[in-house]
Image: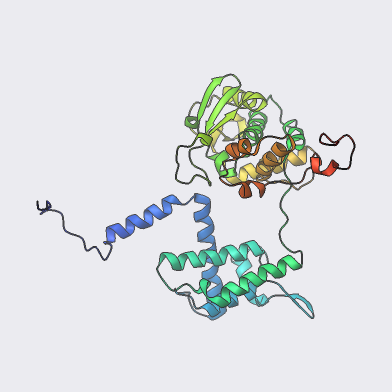
Amino acid sequence: MPFPTLNNVPALQPEMLSNAATRAVEELLREGESANTLASYRSALRYWAAWFNLRFGRPIALPVPPSAVLQFIVDHAQRSTADGLAHELPPAIDAVLVGAGFKGKTGPMALNTLVHRVAVLSKAHQLNALENPCQDAKVRELLAKTRRAYGKRGDLPRKKDALTRDPLMAMVDTCDTSTLKGLRDRALLLFAFASGGRRRSEIVGADMKDLRRSGAASFTFVLAHSKTNQDGADRPENYKPVQGKAGAALGAWLDASGIADGPVFRRIWKGGRLGGALSAAAVRDIVQARAQAAGLPNDFSAHSLRSGFVTEAAAQNVPMADTMAMTGHRSVSSVLGYFRISPKSQGATLLDGDHPHAV
């Protein structure tokens, strides 16, 4: 039986994409990435273009030779010399990059930033099906040895402290219940922690359509899309209970603000007018401002809510399966990356006679 044909639809060539299909692929790739990821890619590529033009006197063009990537690494990574730590980026170029807004400050990059920018350049070559200089043996070895050198010097970034129950409640106590701002901040902090240590993007992306209310102080938050579930698959762990103190705070915020649809957490303008959804940076600012108001050390970030949930769950002997269902992690090694040793750790009291497992 012959296959049907359509006279009014031109046949495509299977060995090459049409212009329309190429645009569709690019649009799907962009849509599949988070806004934060796309912003970080753009920032990294802008920096590569500016650095390359200043360093080599001509615009960047793909593919970039491996020698240029090696130069980028030694320009931005510190190494030990007889005269102390050094890097190769000329001060005049460094000053121009900072003055034009491509860098925040003069000096070497943080190692994480350097690794990320090399990874973004690698991604650009992969997407364009070009020979990838970042996979060159010398580039890979130099990056690996650079990481090891930073580790030997103890120069790796220190993870922020975990925002466990006690410091969190101290921050919550600074939130009054007579203003919308106080109600919002209280609800945001407790919601973010109690629903499994939500990321900033998940907090600002929380929408009323994702909330199911079953009482004055009882909610279920449906986290359909997250970093660990980027396909939006319907999984049992998508459903996060928000109850008790957190549920009561969320209910109080919603009742006072009158929010019935759209973003759960909003900007608040003068006079108590509600604005649009908070930005990810605003979540960070709320955490830091409330920590400062509570007289806590300046060692907390928005991500401290996530490590705080994992650390507190371990301290209170919550089963690992329950913890992972709340955080959304798919592997034990991933969730353990958020664990911080707590003063409540049973491992710290093994020599004490009153240890619960002592004999």
- Determine the residue positioned at 51% across, 59% down: 41
Q: Is residue 40 left or right of residue 145?
A: left
Q: Position of residue 175 (x, y in %)?
A: 71, 31
- Determine the residue positioned at 44% across, 45% down: 231
Q: Quadrant of residue 26?
A: bottom left
Q: Is residue 253 left or right of residue 154?
A: left
Task: Using the image, determine if residue 70 lies above or below residue 4.
Answer: below
Residue located farthest toward the top when viewing the structure as drawn: 215
- Determine the residue positioned at 71% across, 67% down: 150
Count of all numbered marks drawn on residues in the image:
0
Colour scheme of the picture: rainbow
Q: Position of residue 350 (x, y in %)?
A: 85, 42
- Answer yes or no: is residue 54 visible: no
Task: Using the image, determine if residue 250 lies above or below residue 104.
Answer: above
- Determine the residue positioned at 54% across, 63% down: 44
Residue located farthest toward the front when viewing the structure as drawn: 359
Q: Quadrant of residue 52?
A: bottom right
Q: Position of residue 273 (x, y in %)?
A: 57, 31
Quadrant the C terminus occupies:
top right
- Answer yes or no: is residue 148 visible: yes
Q: Position of residue 347 (x, y in %)?
A: 80, 43
State the residue in front, 86 or 137: 137
Q: Is residue 226 left or right of residue 194?
A: left
State the residue in front, 161 or 110: 161
State the residue in front, 357 or 123: 357
State the residue in front, 259 or 310: 310
